[in-house]
Amino acid sequence: MIEWARIVGFDWDSGNARKSADKHSVSQAEAEQVFFNEPLLTLPDHLHSTTELRFHALGRTDDRRLLHVTFTLREAQTRLRIISARDMSRKERAHYGSDK
């Protein structure tokens, strides 16, 4: 379970930031905005949590872009390390409650 009150910021890996920007056209700022807007849906990523706990987040940017963000927790679970960010799929939009 994520203790949101303990989160103090983000921890970006330059390779992950480039991948999200180049491959998916999602900036660091857009990916971070998801965590400040509602609704935010998060669930554990059991399939990819072999060496560390990973999570998926479905949320909106300030411009209402719907994103799927994969992340982990770092620095004693006080920072969010974004692994990837991309537009939600049709199935994810339906789960999120938006069929746009």
Image (cartoon, rainbow, N blue to C red):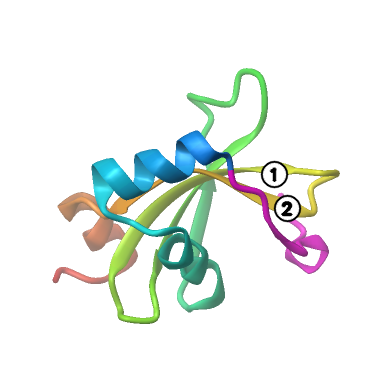
Residue denoted by label 1: 73
Dot 1: within a 10 Å radius of its alpha carbon, few (fewer than 14), some, or many (20 or more) residues?
some
Q: Which mark is residue 10?
A: none
Q: Position of residue 18 (x, y in %)?
A: 40, 42
| Magenta extent | 1-12
- Disc 2 to disc 1, C-alpha distance: 6 Å
Q: Position of residue 98 (x, y in %)?
A: 23, 71
Q: Is residue 65 magenta?
A: no
**Extreme-right residue of the structure:** 76
Q: Is residue 43 above or below residue 100?
A: above
Label 2 sits on a secondary structure element that is: strand
Q: Are marks 2 and 1 in contact (CB under 8 Å)?
A: yes
Q: Is residue 27 above or below residue 12?
A: below
> Who comes first in sequence, dot 2 or dot 1?
1
Q: Nearer the viewer, residue 24 or 98?
A: 24
Q: Nearer the viewer, residue 56 or 11?
A: 11
Indicate the amino acid at tag 2.
Arg
Q: At 73% across and 64% down in the image, what residue appears?
A: 4
Q: Which mark is residue 79?
A: 2
Q: Position of residue 17 (x, y in %)?
A: 46, 45
Q: At 16% across and 68% down in the image, what residue appears?
A: 99
Q: At 77% across and 64% down in the image, what residue appears?
A: 8
Q: At 46% across and 58% down in the image, what residue appears?
A: 28
Dot 2: within a 10 Å radius of its alpha carbon, few (fewer than 14), some, or many (20 or more) residues?
some
Q: Is residue 10 magenta?
A: yes
